[in-house]
Image (cartoon, rainbow, N blue to C red):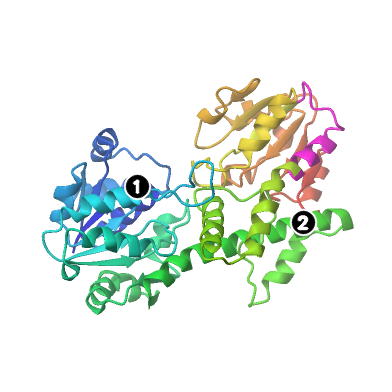
Amino acid sequence: MKLCMIGTGYVGLVSGVCFADLGNEVICVDNNIKKVNLLKKGKIPIYEPGLSELVVKNFKNKRLHFSSDLKKSVKESDIIFICVGTPTKKGGSSADLSQIYNVSKEISSSINKFKIVITKSTVPVTTGDEIEKILSKKNSKKKFSVVSNPEFLREGEAIRDFIYPDRVVIGTNDKKAGRILKNLYSPLISKGTSYLQTSRRAAELIKYASNAFLATKITFINEIANLCEKTDINVEDISIGMGLDKRIGGRFLRAGPAYGGSCFPKDTKAIISTADKFKTNLSVIKSVIKSNANRSKILLDRVYQILNKKIRKKKISFLGVTFKANTDDMRDSSSLKMIPWLSKKGAIINYFDPTGYKKEFSKLKNVSHKSTINSAIEGSDLVIIHTEWNDFKSINFKNLVKGKKFIIFDMRNIYSSTKIKDQGFKYFSVGK
């Protein structure tokens, strides 16, 4: 099939490359000409394991193309995926759909035969209705079908998630579009993937409800971790005990920093905004947002206590600053709250992250990027394990120490407290 992916961000690029790898002819379109030219040279704008190799392979095989000509690309394709950003509106909580609607207007003037127009971006309920109205102004409804097909790709695991998804959700009541899309996804369905066809509005809400529920699980276990710290209980025992209940499951029950990234923060806000529009109170999700916003303060209070209430001129090292491992995404990472606060209090901060230097910290006083773990923790008073990169899971801290021994605050509970303490270090973790 001939596919057009509009937007070469995380969703558009990963989905487009994977569809090409399944044998489809794919055009990835972006209005950033510099970005398009880099992609043609095999240079990837995001960090995602395995993506670069797939781009080069499918581009060489001429199944994957990159273009900045949206209208031409739409005309040459049968299925159009809208994969542009839907960030939170500035000064508000609802999703900014300006890119979605601008793209829809451009598609509208390029429909030369029957097209399936799909929202792959995460969009609020009724967005598909609005896209349909835009396309109907210049085209007969017989010439297009608007479908919701939400993505469920985890950063750092995106290629695996595309090839072996938990489910494929198609939101349409159009039998023709449903038949075509089931055929498109047949290589995944044949391997056992669940295929759910539902109404367009239901598909839109499935994505938001899923992310809100996962954000709730993270926030829930973080609050339980707070209680465990006061009652001398290991939160990991609680996570295991709860997770063995098949109604609950163990995934996303790991205590640590606040949730962040490109999805949970904006999607929890957007579903609240949608509920307000329909005069419905989602009180649980509102509480989740409030609790998560307070999470970094709780962990910073812990740092304050660990350092005996003396932060000024203390050397603090962060191992990892991205919101989670296997991604370079800094969006809503808790390090964006922690490091500026500590800097303002007079701490001297070094950080190391496998994805390198971060411009977000460039203007902060006494904050330095280090290119190795050793150089980052040298001379430290406190080492904070902030992100659960594999690089940090088997460090022999004893071999790295020259002179005084530092304190370790393991925010991801990577290490055994007994093992670290036996090496002579003061060790603190979360929920213990």
* Towards the viewer: 43 or 257: 257
Q: Along the horizontal axis of the image, is 389 left or right of 48?
A: right
Question: Which percent across, then down, holds residue 350?
Answer: 64, 27
What secondary structure is marked by label 2?
A: helix
Q: Along the horizontal axis of the image, is 366 left or right of 260?
A: right
Q: Residues within 10 Å of mark 2 (few under 14, many from 20)?
A: many
Question: Which percent across, then down, holds residue 172?
Answer: 32, 73
Q: Amino acid at mark 1?
A: Gln
What secondary structure is marked by label 1?
A: helix
Which residue lies at the image location 21% right of the left edge and 54% below the top edge?
Answer: 107
Q: Is residue 61 among the parts visible in the rendering?
A: yes
Q: Which residue position holds label 2? A: 225
> What label sits on residue 202 in the rendered view?
none
Q: Along the horizontal axis of the image, is 91 left or right of 79?
A: right
Which residue lies at the image location 14% right of the left edge and 48% below the top edge?
Answer: 72
* Towards the viewer: 16 or 289: 289
Question: Which percent across, then down, holds residue 247?
Answer: 64, 77
Q: Write down the region rendered in magenta.
A: 298-314
Tell which circle, 2 or 1, labels the residue nearer the N-terminal end: 1
Q: Which residue position holds label 1? A: 99
Question: Which percent across, then down, holds residue 79?
Answer: 22, 62
Would you place residue 173 above or below residue 4 in this image?
below
Q: Is residue 62 among the parts visible in the rendering?
A: no
